[in-house]
Image (tube, rainbow, N blue to C red):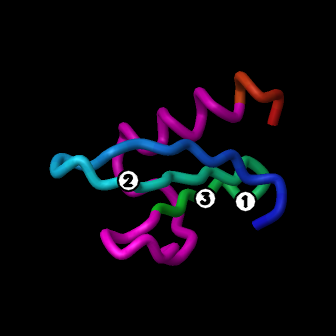
Amino acid sequence: MGGSYVAPSLNGEGQPLYTAINCGARKLNSTSQSGQWKTWEGPRSDAEQQLVNDLCKAKGG
C-alpha cells in the first residue's frame, strides 16, 4: 500500500524481517521467513493497536 511505513528487524534466529503500517487503512503487514509479504490485516492485539496508534500519531496520520 502506498504511504506505508516500513521497519526492518531481526527474528529470534537473526533472520531479517519487515513490518509495515499503513495509517490511512489502519492495517499492518509483515514478511514471512522466506521474505514474502503477507496480507494486510487490522491490529489483532492491544500491542499491535498501540503500535499503529503511536506511529500514526507521531507521523501525523
Q: Is 15 positioned to the left or the right of 20 in the image?
A: left
Which of labels 3 and 2 is toward the front? Answer: 2
Q: CA distance from mark 1 to mark 2?
A: 25 Å
The image shows residue 49, relative to residue 41, as above or below, that is above
Q: Give the residue displayed 48% in from the left and 54% down from the top.
A: 18
- Give, as a three-letter code, the residue at label 1: Ala
Quarter of the picture holding the N terminus: bottom right
Magenta stretch holds residue 12: no
| Badge 1 element | loop
Which of labels 1 and 2 is toward the front? Answer: 2
| Badge 2 element | strand
The image shows residue 18, relative to residue 10, as above or below, that is below
Q: Give the residue pinned by disc 1.
A: 25
CB within 8 Å, label 3 to label 2: no
The image shows residue 26, relative to residue 40, as above or below, that is above
Pointer 1 local density, CA inside 10 Å: few below 14, some 14–19, many at least 20 = few
Numbered tag placed on residue 9 in the rendering: none
Going from N to C along the chain, the mark reached first, 1 or 2, is 2
Q: Give the residue pinned by disc 3.
A: 27
Looking at the picture, how far across and down is residue 48, in whole percent? 43, 44
**Number of numbered discs on residues:** 3
Tell me which segment is drawn in magenta.
31-56
Looking at the picture, how far across and down is residue 32, in whole percent? 37, 71
Q: Give the residue displayed 58% in from the left and 53% down from the top.
A: 20
Q: Give the residue displayed 59% in from the left and 27% down from the top.
A: 54
CB within 8 Å, label 1 to label 3: yes
